Amino acid sequence: MSKKAKNTTEEEIIEEKEVQESAETQEPQTETEEQKPAEESEEQETADSAEETQETAEEAADEPAEAVVSEPVEEPTEPATDVVLEPVEGVEESSKKSKSKKSFSPKKVRFSFSEGFDHLQSNLPALIIACVSAFIIMIIAGCAVFFTNVKGAEKVLVPNVVGKKWDEAFIEMQIKELYPKINLRYSNVPGDEGLVLEQSPQPGAIVKGYSRINLVISRGVVIDAVGSYVGKNLSEVQMSLQTLFAGQTKPLITLATPSYIPDASEAGTILEQDPPEGSKISEPVVVNLVVSRGPNYENTRRPYVIGQSINDLLQTIARTKIVFDITSHQATESEKPGTVVSQQTIEDEYVPNYTRVTVEMAMPEGSNDDNAYGIFQEKLPDYPYPVPMKLEAYPAEGTAYTIINFNHPGGNLTIPYEVPRGTTLVLSVADKVEARKLVE
């Protein structure tokens, strides 16, 4: 075969390939599902075209061979086998070039929307999990960065503000970036109003900045002047001052031992006071009082109680201003049990009020009933004037009752009684229980 014929055959094969490729690239491709069959068809078509090209080359090789016989040619004729092999090698090279060109074909990058949507639906749970995981990781990372970069409050030393004015204490707290929490309280020291009495935490403690410090600030003294006590009862004034300064180790006002004088006013009434009402208190003061002993305090008629029973004697004690010191003994045959058999002899008709008179009673040896006889005895402090007292009985069964109400100046106290066995006797002095006794 001549070189001219070979070149012509190769050019025809290349042209056919180019035409075929241009025709294939112009075909519309819309779905990705047809991509693989299209590629397979292209490969099949390439193989077919290669076979057709080989056949064409063989036919073309035969035709020039006949022309060479009719015309004198100087070159020797090549064997048929050589003619066939050369075009096949060219076809293979061209097919390889064609395949290498087709690797860049746009058909291979076609996109199918429906296939992508189906793929997205099938992987939706995994996509959601991935998004949630990414969100959580982002939050954790943000928190880590935040807490790493944010610096906590610095620790500071708590200053000592006890004894300072409240405004100075507030300024010191502000400098240390601490916040005071205020509690107000009365004090027992005149002139300390507005001072810091206590603080918590204690001075020198280490706390974080912007912490709260508890401060107790004085509201001043409960009273800043001596009150008016004239005309009031001494017991009431004593109770009022005790309540007013309860819990204080050193009260601002204390009462000195009163001076008692006879007066027409009721016993225990305050007649004078020193210092007077309205005196300013700059430090604890002691108030001196003059108290009335009551009208007709000096004299009373002498009593006569021999032969009186226990109930009669109780009425006499409650009615007169005489203090009876009662003793008892077991009644003899000549004596009536439960009566007064003797008393101290008094020559004067009138004696000073609350004079002590000795009385002797005869008590029964035994009893056929359940009552018990005896003398209730108690040692009391000496009072500056007679104070109200009462003796009550609380039987084991039944209702309690009062045996006697009377006034007594204190000291030795004796009261006769006749009560059921098992009764509890209770003595009250100025409405305060002073003593108890169980009668057996």
Image: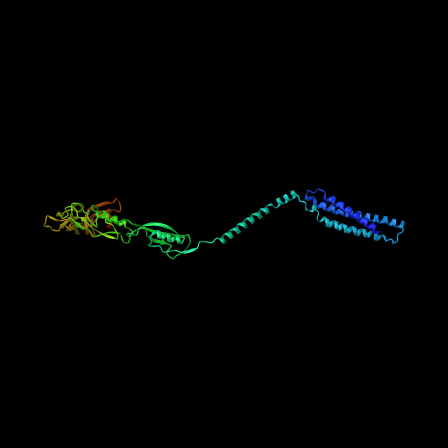
- Most foreground residue, 50 or 325: 50
- Most foreground residue, 247 or 373: 247
**Residue 198 place in picture, x, y as percent:** 34, 53
| Picture colour scheme | rainbow
Q: Residue at x 37, y 50 (%)?
A: 181
Left or right of 195? Residue 228 is: left
Q: Residue at x 82, y 47 (%)?
A: 56
Left or right of 158? Residue 272 is: left
Q: Residue at x 38, y 53 (%)?
A: 173
**Residue 333 place in picture, x, y as percent:** 14, 50
Left or right of 242? Residue 105 is: right
**Residue 85 place in picture, x, y as percent:** 81, 52
The reply to whether residue 436 is visible in this rendering is: no
- Most foreground residue, 30 or 118: 30
Q: How many marks?
A: 0
Left or right of 135? Residue 26 is: right
Q: Residue at x 76, y 50 (%)?
A: 95
The reply to whether residue 198 is visible in this rendering is: yes
Most extreme residue toward the left is 347
**Residue 428 place in picture, x, y as percent:** 23, 48
